[in-house]
Image: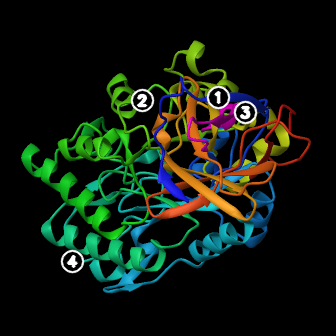
Amino acid sequence: MEQKEKLGLLDRCRSEQVAYFAPRQGHIHNPGMGIISMAISDHMVTGYTPQAREEQDRKKPFVLTRKMLEDVTALPYIDNLYLRVGWNDVQQERGKLSLLPEFEMAVEAAREAGISWGFRIMQASPSNPREHLLPDFLADKLPVYPYYDGAFYGPQPRKLPLYTEEYLKYWGEMLQLLAEKYDADPALEYADLSGFGLWGEGHHGCHTTPGGPVVDLELDPPARTQEVVARLIESHENAFTKTPMVLNLVMSGYEASKDAIRRGCWVRRDSYHKWFQADHALNGLERDPEAAMIFETVMPGIYMHDDEDPNFRYGYMEIPDRMCDYGASYGIVGFNIPDTLYADHLMPGLFDAFKNRLGYRLRPSIVWKLTKPDGRESLVLGMVNDGTVTPPGQLCFTAKSGGQTSRVWVGGGEFGGKMRLVELPLPEGHDKSVVLELSLKIREKLRPVRFAVRTGEQEAPFELTVRLCHENP
């Protein structure tokens, strides 16, 4: 039996309390939320003071190894691996993928560990040692803009591709190739909108001369820029129909971006520091209640820049709590696996807020057995969300008893702020106890959800047993 949930009038029904469930402390591994470790990025260096990081950023990056992946996926609180690579790391020839071996290795590691993964393909990055990130077949074909960023690899010019019609065409073709391979993968949880600005995040602040001032590039007239953003969003959404798109809030001021946010795309902010502006915060808060929020990145050991307010940033250990205050579904620690492992070994408290507050944490605080005037019976679940955000998708509540099953669907955006009553019909011919299960459907991918209840088990449970009497479970 399956139905859309609609709680009816209860004043003529008889109810009795049959179960109570207390909140759970500690990490809960669930879809649509969690702690992220970057597996591959354009920051494959280490260093945990500002001085050491600046020095290491100029060195040759290290290469991801299987041992690193094994070590980080063995951490019980890592929920997601993030792959942040260049366009030329996934394609070299037209019409064909040429995936970086480390990319495929990281995807396989996530699948084997039973966790999810996400990715971003960048078309330009100052923190990548290569002068450009274009595939071989486009390196001499697309026009580029030279820019400089001595903070990473010295005074040599880098190349930012211009947003021509050819560029948009080939970018869309690459997205289609990736989607054909990965869009249906149950472990792929999200895919970032990219292809615009530095790091694919929408930034256009560049040094146009070596050591010169930072200039906000205007590569096209405003109307054309609005069109480019709309085309990039359209290409991404046409390719990835089963996987949520993540839009960086740096890009949220464009009309197509605002429309995508209203339509339910997920959002990301690449830092919570002084660059996180009030208009970005507002745009993120106005997202659909069934859309997730992803935050980058907490750097272990790195405190502040000289021009920042020490009262705000000096306590880097507090950044995860502040991200949760805003309403984070996901939080990233570090730019690579050694960063995450460093924090795990030397400052494990950095993860505490993420373990205890991040994402949604659903439980039935109280359960009633309901008998209607016509004799039909239901459970009424007093659902509470102890987390900081609503679940990013549709929730399926399931009751199993006597070999029969009943289900009801409720939008995840309805679970926030106060108790929400969910009526779940009891299966016909039910026994004296009922097993409750919960699943979350994100786009077309359905995955089981753990209840955030206190038990004697090491992991939060996928099932709760309710005895249909006055006894506590």
State the mark number for residue 141: 4
Alpha carbons under labels 2 and 1: distance apart: 55 Å
Q: Is residue 135 above or below residue 186?
A: below
Report helix, strand or loop for mark 3: helix
Q: Quadrant of the C terminus?
A: top right
Alpha carbons under labels 4 and 2: distance apart: 35 Å
Compare marks 4 and 1 and give the one earlier in the sequence: 1
**Which residues are the magenta region?**
357-376
Total marks placed: 4
Horizontal side, residue 328 vs residue 34: left or right: left
Residue under the image location 53 percent in, 72 percent down: 185
Q: Residue furthest front?
A: 374
According to the image, label 2 marks what residue?
275
Compare marks 4 and 3 and give the one earlier in the sequence: 4
Is residue 3 among the parts visible in the rendering? Answer: yes
Q: Closer to the camera, 252 or 432? A: 432
State the mark number for residue 45: none
Horizontal side, residue 56 vs residue 175: left or right: right
Report helix, strand or loop for mark 2: loop
According to the image, label 3 marks what residue?
356
Q: Quadrant of the N terminus?
A: bottom right
Compare marks 2 and 3 and give the one earlier in the sequence: 2
According to the image, label 1 marks what residue?
14
